[in-house]
Image (cartoon, rainbow, N blue to C red):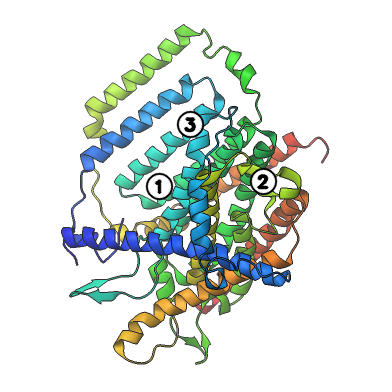
Amino acid sequence: MLSLPIFLVASVVKIVLVIFILLTAVAYTVWLERKVVGHMQNRWGPSRVGPFGLLQPLADGVKFLLKEDLTPPHVYRPLFIAAPMIAVICALTSISVIPFGTAIPVAGHIIPLQITDLNIGLLVILGVTSIGVYGVALAGWSSNSKYSLLGGLRASAQMVSYEICLGLSLVGVLIVSGSFSLQQIVESQRGYFWGFIPKWNIFYGCQFVAFFIYLMAAYAETNRIPFDLPEAETELVAGYHTEYSAMKFAMFFMAEYANMITVACLATILFLGGGNGPLFGPPLLRLILPTFYFVAKVFVFLFTYIWVRGTLPRFRYDQLMAFGWKFLFPLAIANLVVTALVVAYRS
Amino acid sequence: MCTGWYTSDMAPVATTFFFYFLSGLAILSGVLVITRKNPVHSALALILTLLSVAGLYLMLYAPFVAGVQIILYVGGIMVLFLFVIMLVNIERSEREKQFNQQWLPGILAACGLGLLFVLIYVKGKALFSQPVITMPETENTQRVGMMLYSNYMFPFEIASLLLLVAIIGAVVMAKKRI
């Protein structure tokens, strides 16, 4: 138990740290994406600014800040300005319930590596991401241009459709672990099946099906290839952010990548055992290892994101809807029923 | 809303302020819903109302209801509302008359509702006993699930049947040829 002042100090420090790390991670995910996709297409990617182009995110940031911030005359100003803010706020808020590792002792207090552990943590993430749709939808509407409006409409339809599959794919995990708290979901995945297979949810029963559904729905929720219809360049110029420039555009960009990272964290926690892994060595190493495992799993997930982007073409709009409703949705329900049967049989 | 580590021994902070802030916000945005001419602004005000009501649910120690309120109403239903409204021709809808002229039924309904509110305020103590929190907050959500699938199984199933009928009805109405 901590007293109020220590609680406040610990929380503020953690929030500042997490936001700083998240934004740095966002910047370097963009760098990684440009580099990896570049190599996949037989190009070098960013290579001029710093060694291996490592300072490229910094240069991009400076450019975004210094460029002229255009506001076209035909837009509806209050919402045009509010929309990127909504997107960024929702993207940054959902990271607050993610547990990054075990609790660490600092100056005699046990501090968990998580901004706050809510017993409805998963619901908070789902709720905040569902509010995030408004950033995209309102940007499309307030821009008052046909490309933006079409992008906004596509985004809202797509997100509402795939949110159902996303939610249903998570219910299986909830049945297995019996809690909404992300900390407890991670706890429930400690240990091994038959002594060598880690007891992660992805290996439990047919949860790999749920993982596949989650993967697809997550790609659609974050508007990534092959589901990036809201910003399809070939049809809609740039979709919902056609009219945006400079920092407002950068905010949408940041929101998209922050959402990718949150989704990767969530996948790690729900299916890949969070920070669980073999612990060894001196006490200090034992404290750091869970965070290391967590970050490594998130990195694998992010790399898959980029890999898919470099590999797959974009869906057509009707294919997107048919895939969501006629394939993923029945599959998610079937998985739910089978999981419930397995859990009922084992208990 | 926190488990374990911090808040179990900490008293809630500034409850009164948050109550009046959230209810004021709910009422203000509720008024905006019916007074704005632009339907998109009305929809946004309605979203704000729903969010502040979700905050009130949180203050009543009902985190699950608050979460579901946000996910279903704000994240689902209102997105669909907005989806339709965004396609509406704003210039035409702004020239529409905003209030119909049925003052008499309106005043009667308002009086009836006002009387109900006054009665509840005066006699409410006897009708609704002071709520006592009987279960620890951490188990709240689990207990809701337990109750829903044991004691209230039948009403729950009836509600889902109603929803099924509504879905089929919507499909029948929307499709010309089935």
User: Which residue is rendered at x = 20% and y = 48% of the image?
Assistant: B13
Instruction: Report, in whole angstroms, how far the alpha carbon at label 3 lies from the one at label 1.
Output: 28 Å
Q: Which residue is mark 1?
A: B66
User: Which residue is rendered at x = 28% and y = 22% of the image?
Assistant: B118
Element carrying mark 2: loop
Q: Quadrant of residue A330?
A: bottom right
Q: Which residue is mark 3?
A: A78
Q: Chain of mark 1?
A: B
User: Which residue is rendered at x = 64% and y = 33% of the image?
Assistant: B84
Instruction: Report, in whole angstroms, how far the alpha carbon at label 3 lies from the one at label 2.
Output: 21 Å
Element carrying mark 3: helix
- Give the camera-side residue of B148 and A248: A248
Q: Is residue B113 above or below residue A284?
A: above
Q: Is residue B86 above or below residue A313?
A: above
Give x and y (percent) for residue A20.
39, 61
Q: Chain of mark 3?
A: A
User: Which residue is rendered at x = 47% and y = 38% of the image?
Assistant: A82
Label placed on residue A238:
2
Q: In the displayed structure, does residue B137 sit left or right of residue A133?
A: left
Same chain letter for marks 2 and 1: no
Q: Circle 1: is it few (<14), some (14-19), or many (20+) Cα within 10 Å? A: many
Give x and y (percent) for residue B98.
53, 14
Amino acid bearing label 1: Ala
Quadrant placement of the N terminus of chain A: bottom left
Amino acid bearing label 3: Pro
Same chain letter for marks 3 and 1: no
Q: Chain of mark 2?
A: A
Q: Quadrant of residue A324?
A: bottom right
Q: Quadrant of residue B17?
A: top left
